[in-house]
Image: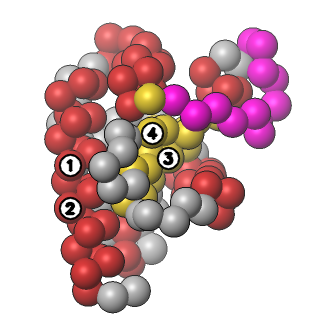
Amino acid sequence: MSASQRNKGSRGERELFALLTEQLGVTVTRNLTQTRGGGADALDVPGWAIECKRCEALSLASWWSQTQRQADDLSRKPALFYRQSRKPWRAVLDLHHIAPGVFTAPGSLCELALSDACTVIRESLGGEA
């Protein structure tokens, strides 16, 4: 990965985490230990492991696999956020975590706008946010 790609990723994380902080009411910061095996990009949202991708070429299947692995390692719910240039942030969540009574097994993914994903996450926090 080139320095410009790393910088773009870091800028993307800061941009996303500022938006999440605003919409969730929880301060979301970068997980600086992630490169040393610390898992997800952000761990500030209780119960959720957040992965952030800022890339032009989409690779949702591999990104989701990474997000799911990291979340499983941390015993958290996975949340993948991504954005291409000049496009809005999008999120991928598992319907099992949104409506577990309806979707009893993991693996039914849905893609949401950032604001809708924040609504789902905020509702899962109950009184924690």
On screen, residue 13 versus residue 101, left or right, reads: left
Residues under labels 4 and 2: Cα distance? 16 Å
State how the image is colored: secondary structure
Most distant residue in the bottom direction = 2
Mark 2 highlights which residue?
11
Residues under labels 4 and 3: Cα distance? 8 Å
Q: Amino acid at mark 2?
A: Arg
Residue 110 is inside the magenta segment: yes
Q: Where's residue 71, x and y in %? A: 56, 50
Mark 4 highlights which residue?
90
Q: Quadrant of residue 20?
A: top left
Q: Amino acid at mark 4?
A: Arg
Q: Quadrant of residue 56?
A: bottom left
Q: State which region is magenta.
A: 101-112
Number of marks drawn: 4
Mark 1 highlights which residue?
15
